[in-house]
Structure formats: C-alpha cells, structure tokens
Image (cartoon, helix red, strand yellow):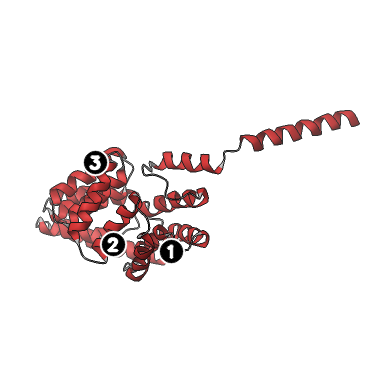
Amino acid sequence: MKQLNYIFSVVLICISFSACNNKPSLKEEVLTLKNEWGFNFPLPSENDSINLLYIQMEESYFTLKFDKMDSLAKKILSIDSTFYMALSFQAFGAWPFDLEKLKLAKEYSLKDTSVHQLIFGGDYSYWIEHDTISALKQYTEVYTRYPDSKIAAWLAGMASLWSKDYQMAISYYKKSLEIDPEFYHAYYDLGDAYLENKEYINAIENYTEFLKHYPDKYRIHNVIGDAYSSLSDSINANKQYHMADSLKNIVEAK
C-alpha cells in the first residue's frame, strides 16, 4: 500500500511539473492577447508585464470600461512612472479630458521615435495645440504604415472628422469596421461623421447600433433625438429625449 501511495505521489508530481512546463510564458501571453485584440502595432515596451497590461488597457478604453482602464494604467505607472501612454489613457478616461496630464504625457513622449509617439502626437496636436493639420498628418501616416489596423483607420477617421472632411472620416470609420465588425466603438464616431455630413438617417442607424452594445450611454438618445429633429420628425425626436431621461435615472441609480 505504501508503495502504491508513493507511486501515486510521484505521478502527481510529474503531472504538476508537466502542467507548469506547459504554462505559457509571459511573452506568449502577450503575443496571444496581441493577436486576439488585433493589436497590429509593435509592442510598446521591452517589459512584457507592461505590454500585457497595455494591450488590456487599450481594449478597455475601446470597450468603454473606463474603471478597468484606469486600474490598468495605475499598474503600468507603478512599474514605469514615465510610461506616457498610460498617462494619456488616464487623461482621455476623464471628462472633461485631463489636459494637464496629457501635457505631462507629451513631455515623456518626446524621447520616443516609434509609431506610438506618432499616435499620441496626433492627440497632443489636436487637444493641446488645436492643430488639426499636424494631427491629420500624423494619423494618416500611422494608417499608411498600418492599413490593416482598425485603430490606425479609426485614428485617421478622427483626424478627418476634426479637419471637417466628413466624407473621408466616414470612409476611414467604415474601413475600421471592415477590419473588425465587433469594434463597436467606431459606430459612435461613424454616427458623428454622418451627423456632421447631414446624413441623418445614416447617423441614426449607426448611433442605434452603438447603443445595442452600450445601452447605458443614455446621452446618445439625445443626439438621435436631435437627428430626428433635423428630419422634422418631432414624434421620434421626443421619444428619444424621453428615453434619454428615463435611462439616465436608471443608470445613475445603479
């Protein structure tokens, strides 16, 4: 019996050891997540712990999970307090945007010569310097380098929207959704581009698609209401305004 117990223990140890050996490395975890999220850009850090947190932080931002995003940003900054991308995400997670934190992120970013500096440089140009020309130049350069990236297409769409080239913004946002039909955040921005282009039916359709995935964003119902008002459809406009008020009470009571 003792011999059987001994053999059983050895087998368990071997199984446990094998399981440990089969556990993916941190680098493998990063690459798997990079692939799942469709993160086409080079990894932003030589530290894989930061890379793992960063990709999760970006995904949280674009799925509107701002509390999770902020928590991940804090973890990154506890490892590297100068990691400007975490500061930038924190700045954009606040409303109104934290421009002082964005300025600090810009200071740290100047040493970076990678595509990440270009990406966030576009943000700095627009939000800090109100320079739409530089933002458009930088974001279209990112898209030229990475035409298969949903984020690159989305950024080019944002810069086109800021530059009031609404037709081009629509084209970029559509490209972003072609690359990843589940990149639901882009429906909101596509709605904005259609609204600015006075294509109200298309705007309503895209805002409605966005709300299917983010129903708590009750303020969008007011925007849809405004689009219906532009179509002289007061009945549907009032329905949307009423829905916004009703959902506001429910969401804020949570």
Point out the residue furthest to the left here. 232
In the rendered image, the residue lying farthest to the right is 2
Q: Amino acid at mark 3?
A: Lys
Depth check: give the residue in front, 158 or 224. 158
Please provide percent x and percent y for residue 247: 33, 61
| Residue 207 in view of the camera | no
- Secondary structure of the residue carrying tag 2 is helix
x 29%, y 38%: residue: 148
Q: Horizontally, is 137 left or right of 121 in the view? A: left
Mark 2 or mark 3: whose residue is earlier in sequence:
2
Q: Position of residue 89 (x, y in %)?
A: 38, 59
Q: Which residue is mark 1?
A: 254
Viewer-nearest of discs 3 and 1: 3
Compare marks 3 and 1 and give the one earlier in the sequence.
3
Of all residues, the one furthest to the bottom in this rendering is 100
Q: Residue at x 27, y 40 (%)?
A: 147
Which quadrant is the C terminus positioned in? bottom left
Query: Looking at the image, is mark 2 or mark 3 nearer the viewer?
Result: 2
Return the residue nearer the eye: 228 or 179. 179
- Which residue was labeled with disc 3? 175
Instruction: Give neighbour class at mark 2: few <14, some 14-19, many 20+ (Cα, 10 Å).
Output: many
Kindly identify which residue carries mark 2.
124
- The residue lying toward the viewer, choosing from 91 and 131, is 131
Q: Which one is earlier in the sequence, the residue at label 2 or at label 1?
A: 2
Q: Residues within 10 Å of mark 1 (few under 14, many from 20)?
A: few
Image mark count: 3
Quarter of the view holding residue 17: top right
Q: CA distance from mark 3 to mark 1?
A: 36 Å
Q: Is residue 218 left or right of residue 65?
A: left
Task: Give me the residue at 43% from left, 53% from top.
Answer: 57
Mark 2: which amino acid?
A: Tyr
Q: Is residue 183 visible?
A: yes
